[in-house]
Image (spheres, rainbow, N blue to C red):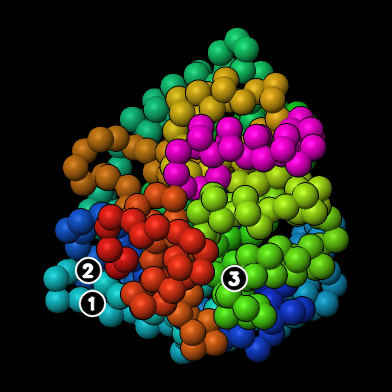
């Protein structure tokens, strides 16, 4: 089995799932899979992927895992009780081969019972693909590259730069992911069982946070704010509704807002003085990160908020050199955090058969209504209804991008 624990997923899946349990337990959703790499042949492995998903659906939370979740201050006891009864159901997910060689993955059902599919299914697709196309991985090269990244981070003047692992969904394999995390723990300051200050801040992966004694990291993802397009009182107020519903659940905890569901301009229109004070900061996930950071700092100053009291999190396709550039631009002007994904967990060489897969699973419908993300990066938007996408752009005063919605 590729996935052996339901904790082998990102923390924000649990934090969002808790909100769903308490505030939107009847919501029905649909997710669709997309591979952004042209020409990747996944169809030959569709039976392997189905078998791994079947195994995933046999898993239950173990007592030790539930006890760990109970230890997190923002996880509530009734949610842990629910997880004690929880099991993913194979009837909600279909995997089909496509004639051109790709695959279609569709997830349909209650949001509460489908939200945990995304991350492990993406990890399954990655590992099945690479164990077939790269049966003899170049782990020595991967280790050399990891050593080089650590050496860059250990340069003088970067002692306060802290990185986190955000790489579960696109990792080369589960075993390689764990090796990378153990090396980062050992060499960048965090030690098992010790909440020591070091350059490695933690991981979004809850299983490895538990196993290695590091901090689990994450708040919310795009799907939460997308679902609010259907669940809120009116479309124009869906972002505000999402932030207010989140704050009602966590009462000031987990206070990082996601800024790019409707683009930065629309985010700043809604992120008024109230939200500037209520939330601890925001996360960047599309568009130019330097421009985003400057605009957010200016927005805080315009609202008479000291940027030094706020955290900017960067997490969009980061490499270590880009992380260092961002640190040098914004260090001393605000608090900073950096989440590095694919470049940590799937960087074993430049061979053509080892290009990391740019795969996603995105929510496309909630309660029968289309939902969408209007990204600041062309090509990252995903919607199955062009008329709805045009209406969404009109409501939020967003010009259409050059590439069409896929």
Q: Which residue is mark 2?
A: 102
In the picture, measured across the screen, residue 311 lies left or right of residue 166, that is: right
Give, as a single range, the part of the protein colored magenta. 284-310
Q: Which residue appears farthest toward the top when viewing the image?
A: 156
| Mark 3 → mark 1, Cα distance in angstroms | 38 Å
Q: Is residue 144 left or right of residue 222?
A: left
- Image quarter hosting the N terminus: bottom left
Q: Nearer the viewer, mark 3 or mark 2?
A: 3
Where does label 1 land, which residue?
A: 97
Question: Mark 3 highlights which residue?
Answer: 236
Question: How many numbered discs, if any?
Answer: 3
Q: Which comes before the other along the chain, label 2 or label 1?
A: 1
Q: CA distance from mark 3 to mark 2?
A: 36 Å
Dots 2, 1 in contact, CB < 8 A: yes
**Nearer to us in this view, 150 or 132:** 150
Q: Earlier in the sequence, mark 3 or mark 2?
A: 2
The dominant secondary structure in magenta is: helix
**Camera-side residue of 173 and 150:** 150
For residue 386, which quarter of the picture? bottom left
Q: Position of residue 49 (x, y in %)?
A: 35, 71
State the CA–CA distance, disc 2 to disc 1. 6 Å
Residue at the spot 44% in from the left edge and 33% down from the top edge = 319
Please report the residue visible at 41 percent of the width from the left and 77 percent of the height from the top: 388
Helix or strand or loop: what does disc 2 sit on? loop
| Residue 294, magenta (yes or no) | yes
Q: Residue at x 68, y 53 (%)?
A: 271
């Amino acid at each position: 089995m590729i996935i052996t624990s339901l904790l082998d997923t990102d923390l924000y899946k649990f934090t969002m799932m808790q909100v769903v349990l308490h505030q939107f337990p009847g919501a029905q959703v649909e997710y669709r899979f997309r591979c952004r790499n042209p020409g990747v042949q996944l169809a030959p492995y569709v039976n392997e992927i189905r078998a791994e998903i079947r195994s995933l659906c046999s898993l239950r939370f173990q007592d030790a895992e539930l006890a760990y979740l109970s230890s997190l201050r923002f996880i509530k006891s009734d949610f842990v009780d629910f997880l004690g009864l929880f099991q993913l159901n194979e009837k909600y997910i279909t995997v089909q081969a496509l004639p051109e060689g790709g695959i279609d993955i569709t997830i349909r059902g209650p949001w509460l019972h489908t939200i945990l599919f995304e991350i492990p299914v993406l990890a399954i697709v990655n590992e099945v693909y690479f164990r077939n196309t790269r049966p003899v991985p170049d782990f020595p090269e991967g280790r050399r590259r990891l050593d080089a990244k650590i050496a860059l981070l250990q340069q003088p003047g970067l002692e306060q730069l802290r990185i986190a692992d955000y790489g579960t969904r696109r990792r080369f394999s589960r075993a390689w992911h764990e090796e990378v995390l153990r090396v980062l723990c050992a060499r960048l300051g965090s030690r098992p069982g010790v909440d020591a200050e070091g350059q490695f801040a933690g991981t979004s992966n809850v299983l490895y946070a538990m196993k290695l004694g590091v901090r689990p990291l994450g708040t919310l993802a795009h799907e939460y704010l997308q679902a609010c397009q259907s669940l809120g009182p009116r479309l124009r107020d869906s972002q505000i509704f999402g932030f207010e519903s989140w704050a009602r659940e966590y009462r000031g905890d987990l206070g990082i807002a996601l800024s790019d569901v409707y683009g930065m301009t629309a985010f700043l229109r809604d992120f008024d003085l109230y939200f500037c004070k209520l939330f601890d900061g925001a996360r960047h996930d599309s568009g130019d990160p330097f421009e985003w950071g400057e605009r957010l700092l200016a927005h805080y100053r315009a609202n008479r908020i000291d940027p030094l009291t706020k955290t900017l999190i960067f997490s969009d396709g980061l490499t270590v050199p880009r992380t260092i550039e961002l640190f040098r631009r914004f260090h001393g002007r605000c608090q900073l955090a950096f989440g590095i994904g694919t470049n940590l967990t799937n960087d074993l060489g430049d061979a053509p058969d080892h290009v990391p897969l740019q795969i996603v699973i995105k929510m496309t419908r909630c309660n029968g209504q289309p939902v969408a993300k209007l990204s600041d990066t062309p090509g990252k938007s995903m919607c199955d209804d062009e008329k709805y996408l045009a209406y969404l752009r009109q409501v939020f005063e967003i010009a259409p991008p050059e590439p069409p919605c896929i």
